[in-house]
Amino acid sequence: MRTAPRPAALAAQAAAAVVVLLLVLVIVRLPWAGDLGMHAATVQRLRHDLVDPGNPLVDADTPSPYYSPWMLVLGFVARVSGLSVFVVLRLGALAGLALLLSGVWRYVRTLSGHRAAPALAVLSLLFLWGTVLFNWSGFYGLNSLALTVSYPSVFALGLAFHFWAWLGRAVRGDSDGDGDAGWGVWLGLGVLWAVILLCHQFSGVVATLGAVATVVAARPGRVVGLRLGGGLVLGLVVLLLWPYYDFFALFGAGGDLESVHRSLYEDLVGRYWLVLLGVVALGMRWRRDRWDSLVLFFVLGVVVVAAGGLSGHWSWGRA
């Protein structure tokens, strides 16, 4: 595949570097906004007691979905280091941002050898949204990411990009370089899928849609299908055994959860119209390959969001 002319690639990389520097400066400032207080309370409770922390939002000894594997790590760091909660959240934000950027780079490299592709992907992720200001956890327009960079959703999406890259290589049978991804690879993928879902459930849904698209696009054979099934079963076991909250009980959540998300379906054109540039690019990919994984991923996302709007499941708009 042709690579970009070096000046163009350098320009894209320089622009991406400037944006990343701005995000690092935001992490230093760590503006108090949105759910930052909830995540700070979660780390504080885990620092106090890693085994039985109680609910981070109310004075009650009840489980909470805020106790994810990533927050458990941050709570452990706060406990053993003695660092303040907000210093730990800054460190977590740096780790999450690094994971996101490295994940984008790895995933893009499974799709294109174009020299400028990873940097352009970062810029697209941050800027191809709309012209109406929109801030929400799990949405990665530049302003939204700046305000949520310390949230578990950023860490989870970073893991998702690595997950898709690893899965893409495994489903093609070249994850370990010898043309055969063994059972260990697939079981590891199952655990990683479960961790993403536990860290941020909505990002986990997106990770799952991307995984389905990747597998369908590869049209794997029976052997890969069996190993994929094994990884899926192990992931479900991890979700079932996670001790801090009942993951599967979240499927029964409704009421206030749905009403809070109803605003996601407002002013869709203003919030998203720049993504039409990406749709044009997807159309070009689809002309080359009717089984293109990015096209399938996009279609699955549109179907889920549309179904949420039609059925009143407004939280599906997080996809």
Image: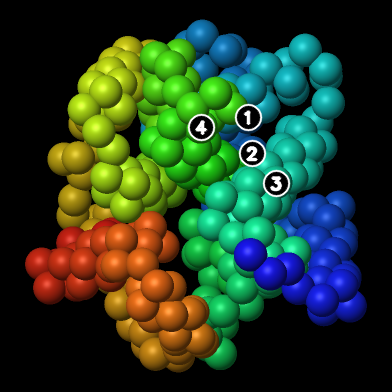
- Amino acid tagged 2: Ala
Along the line of sight, the residue nearer the viewer: 66 or 209: 209
- Give the left or right position of residue 229, taking residue 272 as reference: left
Residue 102 in the image: x percent, y percent? 70, 46
**Closer mark to the observer between disc 3 and disc 1:** 3
Contact between marks 1 and 4 (CB within 8 A): the answer is no
Residue matched to label 1: 43
For marks 1 and 4, give the one nearer the viewer. Answer: 4
Front residue of this view, candidates 290 and 246: 290
Q: Position of residue 84 (x, y in %)?
A: 80, 31
Query: Which residue is the site of mark 3?
Result: 102
Q: Residue sitting at 75 percent across and 64 percent down?
A: 115
Q: Earlier in the sequence, mark 1 or mark 4?
A: 1
Q: Quadrant of residue 309?
A: bottom left
Query: What element does badge 4 sit on?
Result: loop
Q: Does residue 120 appear in the picture of this structure?
A: yes
Q: Nearer the viewer, mark 4 or mark 2?
A: 4
Give the Cα separation between the discs numbered 1 and 4: 39 Å
